[in-house]
Amino acid sequence: MSDKHSGGERELSAWLATRSVERAVAGLQRQLHPRGPTSFLVDLASNDYLGLTKDSRVGHAAAQAALRWGTGAAASRLVTGSLQLHGELEAALTEFTGNEAALVFSTGYQANVGVISALADAQTLIVSDAHVHASLVDGCRLARAGGLEIVRHSDLEGVAAALKGRQHPRAMVLVESVYSVLGDAAPLVELGALVAEYDAVLVVDEAHAIAVAGQEGRGLVAAAGLAGRPDIVTTLTLSKALASQGGAVLGSTAVIEHLVNTARPFIYDTALAPAATAAALEALLVVQAEPALPQRVLELSARLAAGVGVATPAGAVLSVPMRSPEQALHAQAQLAEAGYRVGCFRPPSVPDGVSRLRLTARATLSDDQVDDVIGAITAITDAG
């Protein structure tokens, strides 16, 4: 190895070591903790809101699809990767949410990056809520939009001011229907009125709402009466309540046609695998057949919130503020010892910089389990 290459290696090693020490000092070092197929801990950390990831119907559908179609789609959608299964899932999502058309992506992250980078250009102002997911943030970075304005969380006046004062002919507003950390809902009715008034487009990420919130789990866009409007675009993930993997964009036929032709994460990525596609489709059918599942999640999340003293969430997600990253990690470890797995969100994963325990309700939790975890969390927080 040449001295030049050795020097580069030393520089990289030193830089990585410095960053690692900085994270450790700040209490922000992260590690992977692989789990086995079974766990003795009660799960209040995952996004398996309906408990369908191990549902036999969903598993059987995935297995049968892999045997029939193969283990992978083998190509991008525009080559040979588009399967009949993809079309069936897109049609089912369209009907379920009340939209005109849908397009399935390989992940929800790619769906968000794809829709923003494809719909925004140099003539577009993007107005983004400060709490949107990292995938929406990265979509803004890749869009090369003419302007970007970040407004305070759920600040309708800020959105209105940005739209009213824009210097660009087009504008796009980005929000989540249910936010992934605080669990609160966006003011979608009011936002829908604003984009109509100022001739803008509203992009709503329903990742944490689909199959959980709204009538029979159809999402908050539908509940707000916005589904099907040409100036409303919805994104969602298949990896949370729908117990699979992948994502989708829903909107007008014209929007979907544009994405097929311009969204790079769609054009250049291998299509969603058959097993994942079939699993999401079957999970959606289960939700339609058993509307009590989404309702159960909302009931349990409300009980959890009341028990630990935080606001009632709009979906399955709620969070308990901690004084520091170290306290959050300690509380998480104590709960694990008590038999409960909960999430621990620390900067930069929290939009307001406040470390939190993040809890997610699941339809398969028992009333006794919910009561027990409330008691455990209360004891930890009371102890300081």
Image: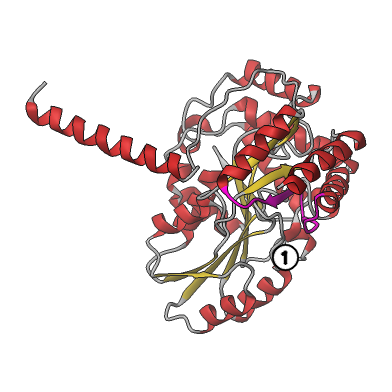
Q: Going 57% across and 43% down the picture, which residue do you hit?
A: 326
Residue that mark 1 sits on? 226
Q: Going 63% across and 38% down the picture, which residue do you hit?
A: 330
The image position of residue 5, as x and y in percent, is 13, 29
Return the residue nearer the eye: 332 or 212: 332
Residue 205, image quadrant: bottom right
| In-image side of 56 versus 94 (left or right) | right
The image position of residue 173, as x and y in percent, is 56, 67
Judged by its main secondary structure, the magenta piece is loop
On screen, residue 320 above or below 62: below
**What is the basis of the colouring in this image?**
secondary structure
Q: Which residues are magenta?
A: 308-324
On screen, residue 150 above or below 268: below
Q: Going 43% across and 77% down the picture, which residue do you hit?
A: 168
Q: Is residue 87 visible?
A: no
Q: Amino acid at mark 1?
A: Leu
Q: Does the magenta segment cover residue 322? A: yes
